[in-house]
Image (cartoon, helix red, strand yellow):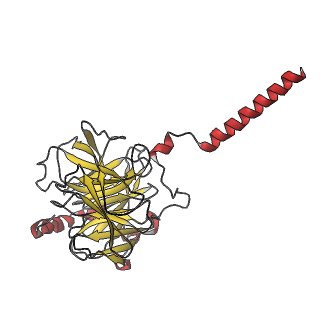
């Protein structure tokens, strides 16, 4: 969002989000936040999405808001841009969020959501773009795959794009007074349209969100706080509020991501020279000791376990040799 009037409207709406607040004992204090870097690149003036790289430790990805260029910026731990990734075949009408995931072959990929609609339903569909996450970081152009999405209950504004690392399924949270979380089909189609279906409520005026690295929780932020949910895609009620996290004061907070270890949140803001803050999670929202640190890749679910295949081959060879010896003895 660009105008102060819209920011004021969002701030007023957040006053009505108290119903989503967890008990105070579960809330982390925004005063515990630590500034980890400042984005100083003059090209980044409206950072509206944030994602943590899976291939490059310490690297964050971000992009500008509406009417910017179709570019993703890779930022190093010092806050400097290490690479500009230009998306060929993509438009940047109103980019509002991004997430990391994989492609249909299980390779690391970046997803960007052209999902903003400041007129609250003017666009009959929205678009999510996917590009491969490069193995080497340098300025380059990547061919984008476009996925068209429509809401089952009609168009709406949204700024939150999330991907479940266990299933690679995409989710969107609308930015409304009565916000909602929407689920995309299990596998996106690059032809035709993909329908987003409502699966639960979201905080009023959500500006961004993300799944934890183990897929056990997700977080959705507003301008001043964030709500953490337990997530279970097998349950009838997939979202269960866990904790409210107070965020540091920001110029216009519109981005959030989990740290790589899932123990804290990274939050950013639109504006020039904005810092990225690390905000610790309350105990209840921390990853469990038994949770899988490395997310399951989509391709791995369809690929036979190499150890099992190897064991089967060894047993097969042993049986064949044994059968041959028995035949010669008889």
Q: Give residue 185's position: percent from left, percent from top.
A: 33, 40
Q: From the viewer's perspective, is residue 17 above or below residue 297?
A: below
Say which residue appears at 67% left-offset and 36% top-offset.
312
Measured as percent of width and height from the top left, residue 231 is found at: 40, 52
Residue extending farthest right: 329
Q: Nearer the viewer, residue 68 or 246?
A: 68
Residue 286: x %, y % from top left: 46, 65
In-front residue for pair 158/70: 70
Image point (19%, 52%), residue name: 91
Which of these two is toward me, 251 or 312? 312
**Picture quarter with the N terminus:** bottom left
Q: Residue at image x 22%, y 40%?
A: 152
Q: Is residue 22 visible?
A: no
Q: Quadrant of residue 147?
A: top left
Query: In the image, residue 210 lies at what x, y percent?
Result: 35, 59
The answer to whether residue 67 is left or right of residue 264 is left
Task: Judge whether 289 appears above or below 314 on screen.
Answer: below
Instruction: Residue at the far top: name it.
Output: 330
- Whether residue 323 is visible, yes or no, is yes
Image quadrant in which the C terminus is located: top right
How many numbered marks have been drawn onto this rendered protein structure?
0
Quarter-wise, where is residue 242 in the image?
bottom left
User: Which quadrant would residue 241 be assigned to in this image?
Assistant: bottom left
Residue 301, above or below 275: above
Residue depicted at x 73% and y 35%: 315
């Amino acid at each position: 969002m660009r105008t102060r009037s819209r920011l004021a409207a969002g701030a007023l709406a957040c006053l009505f989000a108290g119903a989503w607040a967890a008990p105070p004992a579960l809330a982390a204090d925004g005063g515990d936040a630590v500034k980890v870097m400042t984005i100083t690149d003059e090209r980044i003036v409206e950072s509206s999405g944030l994602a943590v790289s899976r291939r490059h430790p310490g690297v964050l990805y971000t992009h500008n808001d509406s009417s910017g260029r179709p570019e993703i910026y890779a930022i190093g731990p010092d806050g400097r841009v290490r690479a500009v990734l230009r998306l060929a075949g993509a438009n940047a009408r109103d980019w509002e969020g991004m997430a990391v995931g994989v492609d249909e072959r299980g390779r690391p990929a970046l997803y960007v959501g052209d999902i903003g609609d400041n007129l609250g339903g003017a666009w009959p569909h929205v678009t999510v773009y996917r590009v491969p996450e490069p193995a080497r970081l340098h300025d380059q152009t990547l061919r984008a795959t476009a996925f068209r999405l429509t809401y089952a209950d009609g168009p709406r504004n949204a700024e939150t794009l999330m991907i479940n690392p266990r299933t690679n399924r995409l989710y969107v949270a609308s930015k409304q007074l009565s916000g909602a979380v929407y689920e995309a089909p299990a596998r996106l189609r690059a032809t035709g349209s993909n329908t987003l279906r409502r699966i639960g409520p979201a905080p009023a005026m959500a500006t961004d969100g993300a799944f934890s690295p183990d897929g056990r929780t997700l977080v959705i932020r507003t301008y001043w706080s964030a709500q953490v949910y337990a997530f279970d895609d097998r349950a009838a009620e997939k979202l269960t509020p866990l904790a409210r996290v107070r965020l540091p004061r920001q110029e216009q907070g519109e981005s959030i991501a989990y740290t790589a270890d899932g123990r804290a949140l990274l939050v950013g803001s639109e504006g020039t020279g904005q810092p990225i803050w690390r905000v610790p999670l309350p105990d209840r929202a921390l990853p469990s000791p038994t949770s899988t640190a490395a997310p399951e890749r989509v391709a791995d679910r369809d690929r036979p376990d190499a150890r099992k295949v190897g064991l089967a081959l060894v047993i097969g060879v042993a049986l064949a040799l044994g059968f041959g010896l028995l035949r010669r003895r008889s």
